[in-house]
């Protein structure tokens, strides 16, 4: 079902309220997600849908990379946080997570970067890690966001998702779907199954899937970009894709 208007307009104006309401109870998932990114010194990171940058305090101060978002209002707060934390290796900019202006993580050194954000971007080899905090259920086509993340990750690189998904084995009654569709206009949907999101990125293999407090509300998923195509249940197909 299509949306009637974009929730970006809402995010544009709610940065302060957003931090005040979500900050406290999302601390644990942000802390664990930073650990799952497993960044080694010098490795590159892309945060897609960085928002107000609430994930920044949990990342290494010398992190090198890029945070992108479509909302200028959210990014202004992220910029203030980045300065306060002294994270000069992280650049921020406006970019659609469904159409990232970065080259494929193919190792092709000839690939070049286009778009407004260029500092902190690896030279065509792809990002070492991608972080998708509360974005794939916010964007109408979240599987497209994951597919783009997979495209710009280097082979062997990690994608970490912190979000909330509908249980795979539970029915979605019509009223639930209708409520989720309505909420999607203002914030995010809650009726997406992760298998639907992952369908866009078959060469990302799930390494870890855990529920995080409060009460297992958040889902923290660590994926790795393989050199071989794979299906959702983790089994690999025979032919090499040479991604
Ligand atoms: C729920 S907030 C999450 C913000 C932050 N990652 C966090 O965890 O607090 C969703 C963010 O996604 C951004 N967003 C929505 N659609 C987007 C898109 N297509 N590309 C990039 N960012 C987008 C919104 O502007 C908003 O900042």
Image (cartoon, helix red, strand yellow):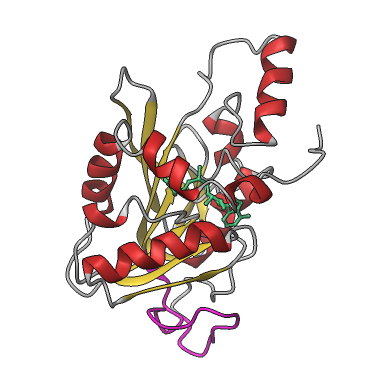
Vertical comparison of 185 with 65: above or below: above
Is residue 27 one of those drawn in magenta? no
Q: Position of residue 31 (x, y in %)?
A: 23, 43
Classify residue 211 as left or right of residue 107: left
Task: Look at the image and give the residue range highlighted in magenta.
Answer: 108-128
Vertical comparison of 17 with 39: above or below: above
Classify residue 237 as left or right of residue 131: right
Q: Quadrant of residue 73?
A: bottom right
Q: Quadrant of residue 206?
A: top left
Vertical comparison of 91 with 208: above or below: below
Q: Report the predominant secondary structure element of the magenta stretch.
A: loop
Q: Position of residue 152 (x, y in %)?
A: 50, 67
Residue in the foreground of this view, choosing between 187 and 241: 187
Residue drawn at 48 percent across, 62 percent down? 75
Q: Position of residue 87 (x, y in %)?
A: 26, 71
Vertical comparison of 170 with 158: above or below: above
């Amino acid at each position: 079902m299509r949306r009637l208007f974009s929730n970006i307009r809402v995010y544009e104006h709610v940065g302060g309220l957003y931090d005040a309401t979500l900050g406290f109870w999302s601390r644990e998932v942000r802390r664990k997600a930073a650990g799952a990114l497993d960044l080694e010194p010098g490795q590159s990171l892309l945060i897609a849908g960085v928002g107000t940058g609430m994930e920044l305090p949990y990342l290494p101060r010398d992190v090198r990379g890029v945070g992108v978002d479509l909302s200028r209002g959210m990014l202004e707060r992220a910029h203030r946080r980045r300065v306060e934390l002294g994270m000069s290796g992280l650049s921020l900019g406006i970019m659609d997570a469904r159409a990232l202006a970065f080259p494929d993580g193919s190792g092709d050194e000839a690939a070049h970067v286009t778009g407004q954000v260029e500092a902190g971007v690896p030279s065509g080899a792809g990002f070492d890690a991608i972080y998708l905090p509360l974005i794939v259920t916010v964007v109408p086509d979240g599987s497209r966001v994951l597919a783009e993340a997979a495209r710009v990750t280097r082979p062997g690189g990690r994608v970490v998702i912190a979000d909330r998904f509908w249980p795979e084995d539970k029915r979605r009654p019509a009223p639930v779907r209708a409520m989720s569709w309505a909420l999607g206009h203002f914030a995010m949907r809650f009726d997406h199954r992760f298998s639907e999101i992952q369908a866009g990125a078959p060469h990302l293999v799930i390494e870890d899937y855990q529920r995080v407090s409060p009460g297992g509300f958040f889902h923290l998923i660590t994926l790795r970009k393989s050199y071989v195509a794979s299906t959702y249940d983790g089994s690999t197909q025979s032919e090499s894709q040479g991604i």
